Amino acid sequence: MTDLEAALRRAVRGEVGFDTTSRALTTMDASNYRRVPLGVVAPRDADDVAAALEVCREHAVPVVARGGGTSIAGQATGTGVVLDFTRHMNRLVGIDPEARTAVVQPGLVLDRLQDAAAPHGLRFGPDPSTHSRCTLGGMIGNNSCGSHSVAWGTTADSVRELSVLTARGRRLRLGQEWAGAPEGLRELVDGELARLRTGFPDLPRRISGYALDALLPERGADVARSFCGSEGTLGVLTEAVVGLVESPRARALAVLGYADEAGAAEAAAGLLPLGPLTVEGMAVDLVPSTEGLPRGGAWLFVETGGDTEAEARARAEAVVRAADVVDALVVTDPGGQRTLWRIREDASGTATRMPDGSEAWPGWEDCAVPPARLGGYLRDFRRLLTAHELRGTPYGHFGDGCIHVRIDFDLLSADGVARFRRFSEELADVVVAHGGSLSGEHGDGQARAELLPRMYGAETVALFERAKAVWDPDDLLNPGMLVRPAPLDANLRFSVLPREPVDVEFGYPSDGGDFSAAVRRCVGVAKCRTTSVPGAGVMCPSYRATGEEAHSTRGRARLLHEMLAGELVTDGWRSTEVRDALDLCLSCKGCRSDCPVEVDMATYKAEFLHHHYEGRRRPAAHYAMGRLPVWLRWAARTRTAPVVNALASVRPLAAVAKRLGGIAGEREVPRLAGETFSRWWRKRGGRPTGGGDLVVLWPDTFTEHLSPSVGRAAVRVLEAAGLRVALPPTLRGPAVVGDGTSRSALALLSARRGQVCCGLTYVSTGQLDRARAVMRRTLDLMAPVLETSAPVVVLEPSCAAALRTDLPELLHDDPRAARLAARVLTFAEALERHAPDWNPPAVNLPAVGQTHCHQHAVLGDAADRRLRESAGLTGELSGGCCGLAGNFGFEAGHYEVSAACAEDQLLPAVREAPDGAVVLADGFSCRTQLEQLAGVRGRHLAEVLAERLE
């Protein structure tokens, strides 16, 4: 391997990675399979590709071309050298609106092409649900389709010319009339014309095998079209000319409700004569909530287009009239359509969990049958599932007869794997009996190639082998795919994971307490790799800042998988590779909500850091900022905040302090408040007033010591709403809520004074032993509160999220933790639930800012939206993460990424704000980032409302 690496470094101008991290990141795609490559090359251009192929040929090392790594059949994995086209060869070379064509490199993400084509009223027709991260090269390799294939066909229908390098270094320009055909291909076809005319099923979604029938003379002898769907086994794509289609000016979405999926499937083919853009189907067992959907147990999503909204609506209503439905809904509002489509696009991830939380996997993800036979096929499919005691949730492209499904195969035990094989063989026969194709979109890969003889027969499969030999006589390109395939039950990615649960600190309640199961959640659909603006979404800010796979949620999950496997990453919890990948994780928790399978990388990071540094010296920042509550309480008790502020204002002293504390030199140290929130509360009287509902206001570390104005404002607003406000007890034992002095003298002598804390800073730095101790002390203090029905109002979103999730998951053995978590309310939720008749003061101004990432991911912001609307605060807050994220943005080495995260959505939104706009930022980190990077003062919603009370 050393000789190979050295030769590649001499020959290639792009990056060559034979290190553990580079290899670990490419062991898997979105399939069930895993192969460990020797190394990864990121070529800069076609010359680099040619050089890499020459070196690999000399060393007899296979080559796998890889795009977004979202393939579901295993074809983007290999044991040789992986060519990563996403890093450099990812450009849109040009676009010709008149000819309606575009020239693209293989690593270009589909959404980037769509963005460029949209101003011309054009688009690329195929649009898989992974459109925000899949690449054109991968789409050509798999002949991808997407939801609009009933209107615009497969990727092969949109390909005009392809520039390809063969394994032996020939540069070919593929097109019609045998253009670019390698020597011997025409002779091969001329000798098999009868077989090519009769041996291929005629259906819109036949992706399995090689498309040799595209080489028939009556089909234009289209070598480019024949190359599509070859899964990187014939040549390496370096550039493509693709066709574009006219995008309808207006669209409408008809959602048709049916009693069950068979009814929806049988109706789909009958709607095709009406010329819809999509006919997508899904059943109720895939939908977390049917809110917003018409009545029914299954639905067809039928999109129509037109020059005007009225024309699109009229066509959608015609679809409704033609359909025999239980109920129907027509939506023309683009926002409403996006909401509904999101349900369908997230299905590839949500389908990986059954309703009871058990795991489900790909493997029979996209079989296709003639659309008119789809209903019968689905019934046979369900019967086969039942016979094998398996469960699955079919959905997909009903108008094309193509069904996606994840099935709860047991791929961890020998018996389960054997069942997986038996089911696969029997289902292949069912598909063939219905005149179908084993693959209708995602290719054969390892998942289905072994079964191609059942579909095509041995002689046609032998013809595929001969075609492969014409293109790639050395079998250098992606061997084991399509021809001479590896067994469908070999190389399973789960086989290397430990069989016994790993000893961990968090409870992982959704994964049965099993850390391995939590890591297995990542199936590789890579929504975290999106580069388009996700609107209100958060995931994944570090990837969006760096563009590096290692900094995506998927990349980190892959490294954790390899850490557990112990084959490639061999030092377990002490792994520096995993540590370095997690270093730029902001712990924003965005993946907890935005990832379709709810990967929770913030928790995994805390778990890893706990074990990684167990018994060892930690980074200085962990002591300086991880134990921030201790230092701030010390300053408050000694009343030295003015001294600390004065010293921090002396630049040489501040620089030394920051260096010792592991704090970024570019950061200003926030000023401590001269008077803490609790001290203000005690001076005010320290007792609840009024006669409304009692609410306990949580004095989080940031409100207490750094932003007491937020706490004071919240008290004013809550009391103005008629609520009685108290603070948590500060003495352990049976104290009166909000009053730590109403006790007997004997009790006072034996009591210990304390202050509640959610433990957030300890969790985020992985100091889980300390976090657990802090949380238990907090539960002791909160005992009197838990004996009442009072809610706990938390103003800092990150602290509220910690109490809602980290507390019960870390103290999963203490029932008080779940009770406290259930009491936690945000400021807006408290007003909505406990003062429903109160009307906030009118602000009547536009609002800008950012929904706190933890609020988006854990708490939800529906109540905040309603409160802002009631107060006349107009406009939408941006998504994303501010980039400071507690300790993250303050740590040395993180400043550039932190600033880049802020520049993604927050800072542009604030710069573009209308005059007089209110800048809302409920999180202390968000307010600090705004102040330090933009010189803008952000305010908590409580402060804005309190100001208007006057």
Image (tube, rainbow, N blue to C red):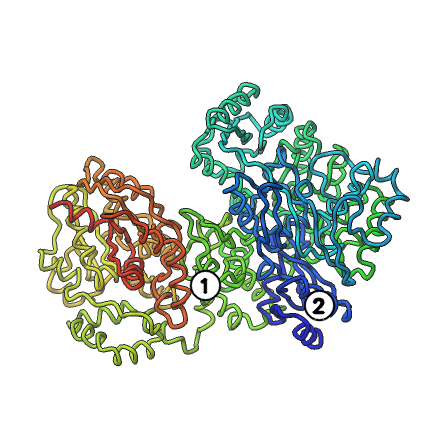
Mark carried by residue 51: 2
**Residue 836 in the image: above or below residue 766:** above
Residue 444 locus on image (x, y percent): 71, 48
Front residue (pair 297, 10): 10
Extreme-front residue of the structure: 98
- Identify the element where label 1 is drawn: helix
Choose top left, top right, bottom left or bottom right for residue 68: bottom right
Badge 2 amino acid: Ala
Q: Is residue 632 left or right of residue 25?
A: left
Q: Is residue 396 left or right of residue 200?
A: left
Choose top left, top right, bottom left or bottom right for residue 606: bottom left
Asked if residue 298 shows in the view, the reply is no
Residue 564 locus on image (x, y percent): 57, 64
Q: Which of marks 2 and 1 is in front?
A: 2
Mark carried by residue 527: none
**Residue 290 in the image: above or below residue 88:** above
Asked if residue 415 shows in the view, the reply is yes
**Residue 763 in the image: above or below residue 141:** below
Which residue is drawn at the image coordinates 55% and 33% (left, top)? 283
Which residue is drawn at the image coordinates 27% and 70% (left, top)? 669
- Identify the element where label 2 is drawn: helix
Residue 715 locus on image (x, y percent): 16, 50
Q: Residues within 10 Å of mark 2 (few under 14, many from 20)?
A: some
Residue labelled with disc 1: 605
Going from N to C along the chain, the mark reached first, 2 or 1, is 2
Q: Residues within 10 Å of mark 1 (few under 14, many from 20)?
A: many
Dividing the image into 4 quarters, which one contains the N terminus? bottom right
Distance (Cα) linking label 2 and label 1: 39 Å
Which residue is drawn at the image coordinates 82% and 48% (left, top)? 464
Badge 1 amino acid: Lys
Front residue (pair 731, 86): 86
Front residue (pair 430, 199): 199
